Image (cartoon, helix red, strand yellow):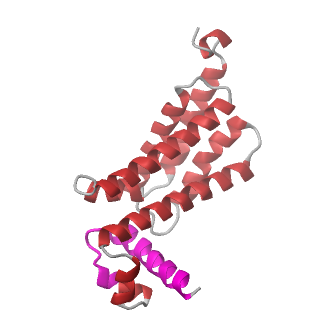
Amino acid sequence: MEHDDARTRILDAAEELFYAQGVQSVGMDAVRSASGVTLRRLYQYFPSKDDLVEAYLLRRDGRWRAALATYVAGAAVAPKDQLLAVFDWLARWFAEPGFRGCAFVNSFGELGATSPAVAAAARHHKEEFAAYLACLAEAAGAPPATGVHLTLLAEGAITAAAIHADPTPATDAQQAARLLLDATAALPAALLRGE
């Protein structure tokens, strides 16, 4: 139990510091201090900073996607409404104190060129998010490419919200998503099947 508690405290501290300040500007001593563990204990769990960054990203990915899916499942029953609920969840996230955009894009921007683990974690997160949106789009009866289009809307909203420190891009992207879904609903069934 103590092992799990110390590891959790380390990851909690790393997540808070890395997301708020950037991965490169936070040293292992800062994580040690914020987590309340000894430097020796920190290195027992994470032999290098790269190991800690990778663990932080993997945990954040699972938590972020689970929070999104839970919200969407509870917000609506109809597939189209679930798709639109994704943007409601994004708006809530964008309005949180300390929102700094996508942790995976931020980490990739800092370390993606030099850390294969960070690049892989960022790609995995983006691929899973895109697959989730594609699944929702398919359930809504939209053409296959719609998932890609919705992903671009969501990713653009995340970036714009971070740069402008404004949650409005989620609402704008949701309006564009609604127009896209309405337009695809009006297409003949043969076109939706790719005939």
What residue sits 61% from the left and 36% below the top? 135
What residue sits 54% from the left and 33% below the top? 147
Q: Position of residue 26 (x, y in %)?
A: 29, 75
What residue sits 54% from the left and 80% below the top? 4
Q: Is residue 92 left or right of residue 42?
A: right
Q: Position of residue 118 (x, y in %)?
A: 34, 57
Q: Residue furthest left?
A: 114
Q: Is residue 131 above or below residue 145?
A: below
- Compare residues 175 and 105 and report the one nearer the observer: 105
**The N terminus, quarter of image:** bottom right
Q: Position of residue 33 (x, y in %)?
A: 37, 88
Question: Magenta segment, principal secondary structure?
Answer: helix
Q: Position of residue 158 (x, y in %)?
A: 45, 50
Q: Is residue 57 left or right of residue 170?
A: left
6 drawn magenta: yes
Q: Is residue 95 above or below residue 29?
A: above
Q: Is residue 103 visible?
A: yes
In magenta, the rendered stretch is 2-31
Q: Is residue 101 visible?
A: no
